[in-house]
């Protein structure tokens, strides 16, 4: 059994959710969800990203019980017990499903790596920390500094 997330993990998940809710969902640009909520990437591949965004053009993927297909953005908040899984198995599953943008947040290092899908593979736009702003293609108006997502 996987241990429960730590307080710093949950704090970061909440901060990403609140920020994206205010800047995406509250202004009518899409839907924001946080775990636990199923995302069916393929009939036999179901994941629960920590936070996800589905933009308005793709809202037909959102059902009451799950999201069917690739969200536009997924965020995984790494923890020691899940970091290898997040960086390899989930990375591969998200790429195969066509998730355009994938962020891996690390509360211990207080960083966010932004990955974008190009030609079926993820490429890093960089690892960001401190006062840096995230160069998101899905949420291009990101004005919060990276450090604001960590306790």
Image (cartoon, rainbow, N blue to C red):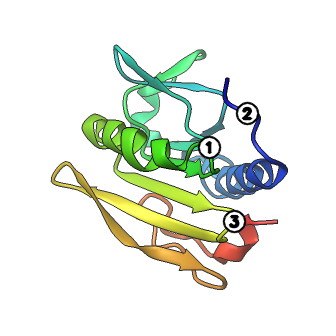
Confirm or deny contact between disc 1 and disc 2 (CB under 8 A): yes
Kindly report the distance in space between the C-alpha atoms of the residues bearing marks 3 and 1.
13 Å
Q: Earlier in the sequence, mark 1 or mark 2?
A: 2
* Any part of residue 144 in sight: no
Question: Tag 2: Cα neighbours inside 10 Å, few (<14), some, or many (≥20)?
Answer: few
Vertical side of 145 occupied by 149: above or below: above
**Going by the image, does 117 lie left or right of 142?**
left
Residue 130 vertical placement versus 27 (above, below):
below
Can you give x and y, in whole percent of width and height, for residue 51 in the image? 61, 44
SS class of the residue under badge 3? loop
Q: Which mark is residue 148?
A: none
- State the residue position of label 3: 108
Mark 3 or 1: in front is 1
Per the image, label 2 sits on a secondary structure element best described as loop
What residue is shown at x 38% (from left), y 45% (from top)? 88
Q: Position of residue 10 (x, y in %)?
A: 77, 47
The image quadrant of residue 92 is: top left
Label disc, if present, on residue 81 of the rendered structure: 1
Quadrant of the rendered structure where residue 64 is?
top right
Q: Position of residue 101 (x, y in %)?
A: 40, 54
> Could you say which disc has been placed on residue 3 in the image?
2
Q: Earlier in the sequence, mark 3 or mark 1?
A: 1
Visible residue check, residue 103:
yes
Q: Position of residue 105 (x, y in %)?
A: 59, 60
User: Left or right of 114: which side holds 92?
Assistant: left
Q: Residue at x 35, y 68 (%)?
A: 124
Q: Earlier in the sequence, mark 3 or mark 2?
A: 2
């Amino acid at each position: 059994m996987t241990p429960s997330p730590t307080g710093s993990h949950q704090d970061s998940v909440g901060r990403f959710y609140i920020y994206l809710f205010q800047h995406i969902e509250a202004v009518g640009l899409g839907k924001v969800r946080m775990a636990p909520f199923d995302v069916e990437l393929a009939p036999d591949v179901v994941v629960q990203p920590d936070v996800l965004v589905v933009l308005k053009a793709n809202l037909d993927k959102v059902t009451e019980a799950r999201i069917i297909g690739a969200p536009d953005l997924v965020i995984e908040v790494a923890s020691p017990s899940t970091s290898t899984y997040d960086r390899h198995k989930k990375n591969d599953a998200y790429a195969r499903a066509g998730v355009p943008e994938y962020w891996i947040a690390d509360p211990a290092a207080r960083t966010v790596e932004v990955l974008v899908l190009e030609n079926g593979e993820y490429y890093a736009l960089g690892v960001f920390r401190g006062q840096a702003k995230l160069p998101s293609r899905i949420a291009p108006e990101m004005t919060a500094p990276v450090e604001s997502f960590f306790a």
